[in-house]
Image (cartoon, rainbow, N blue to C red):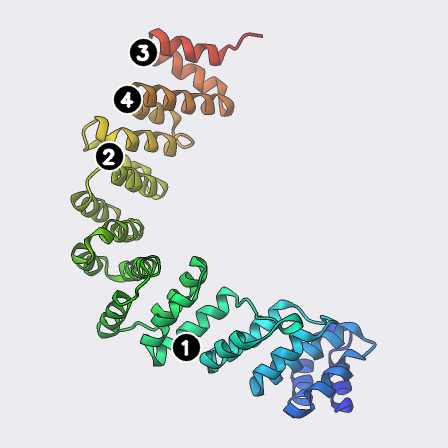
Amino acid sequence: VAELVAAAAERWRGGREGVAASAQALAFLSRIEAAQMPEALEAARALSDRPASTLVMKNLLVHWAEMEPALALNWARSDASNSYNAEVIDGMLNTWAARDPKALMNWNAKTGTGAIRRLPLSESVIGTVFRTLAETNPAEAVMNLSRLRSPNQRGQALRGIFDTVRTETQREEIVALIATIDFDDVRIQARRAMVEQWARYDAAAAAVFVEKAEPAWERTRLMDSLGMTWLQSDPATAAEWWVAHAPGADTLVKIVNVWAQSDPNAAGAWLGKHAAGPAGDAARMTFARQVADLDPESALRWADTVTDVTMREGTIDHVFNDWLTRDRVSAKQFLQKSGWSGERLGRLREALNPNP
């Protein structure tokens, strides 16, 4: 065993990882059996060439994990020398997750305290676990979502599950399974993630589902998920659908906020079709702030269409003062031709010519 370790380390002398040298080193290490791994790792740790020692230990652990993942991981996590980094352990976990996710979860749940305490699985590993589970048993994958406390972890798990959905029949199965989740927060997150994934390739079909989703009180959240995703591919259609099914100031703001980032001219033209008034004030304020960096003059004209006095003047002040810090000359020229008068003009001139 020691001779095989030394031969591999010689190929990786000084940490060099050439293709041919690495192939030779791995060939030596592949001859070491599972039962010999602890001895091989100790031999690798004793090497005087530290970069080569680290490479040998990393690859020994990965090789061991392919044969006996639980033993390899317990050894790695109890090793005080820490001759490798967290990426190695993550790679070992991903390999195990792709092969036997239930065994990995059971092992992690049963680990004790101290050096081999329960391991917080990374989002990458969680995604692999749930993808592998869903390939063979979608019901079990969905059922296990409730075991994850973190929304971020559930999000990664859901991406893993939805990666396995390739046909309409599979989608219908997942829709039905998600509907059986007892916990409201988990069910809603799962349905929203499903709608977002669906909208990326068939938004119209996703819209039909959202319009009829039960319980009805979840529809608003599902519309948000669908609308935000649909706006990225077909903003005009998405905007009309969203307003038709969820009319109101909040919907207008959400649409303008997303659309103006990709196509401010089209977003402005669409918003202009909606009459000015209290229902559209927040959207017009949002649009003015969105385009202020690109076209401050247009932004100020949009701000001036807000009907709420406090909101309108606050938006004008914000856009003008921001323009002033970036291009004082242009801001001053605009003010001179703005046609504004009274209190607003006086206020902005004070910003232009502050007292010493």
Instruction: Give SS at disc 1.
Output: helix
The numbered disc on residue 308 is 4
Whichever of labels 2 and 4 marks the residue nearer the N terminus, that label is: 2
- Mark 4, other Cα within 10 Å: few <14 / some 14–19 / many ≥20: some
Looking at the rendered image, the disc whose residue lies closer to the viewer, 2 or 4, is 4
Q: Is residue 326 above or below residue 105?
A: above
SS for callout 2 = helix
Disc 1 packing (10 Å; few <14; some 14–19; many ≥20): many
CB atoms of marks 3 and 1 within 8 Å: no
- 78 w.r.t. 288: above or below: below
Residue 187 falls left or right of residue 92: left
Give the secondary structure at mark 4: loop
Q: In front: mark 3 or mark 2? A: 2
Q: Which residue is mark 3?
A: 339
From what the image shows, is residue 25 above or below residue 248? below
Residue under label 1, please give it: 132
Tell me which amino acid carries mark 3: Gly
Q: Nearer the viewer, residue 195 or 218?
A: 218
Give residue 271's mark.
2
Identify the mark nearer the N-term, 4 or 3. Answer: 4
Identity of the amino acid at label 2? Leu
Using the numbered discs, state the Cα–Cα distance from disc 4 to disc 3 in whole angstroms. 20 Å
In three-dimensional space, the C-alpha distance between marks 3 and 1, rounded to whole angstroms, equals 66 Å
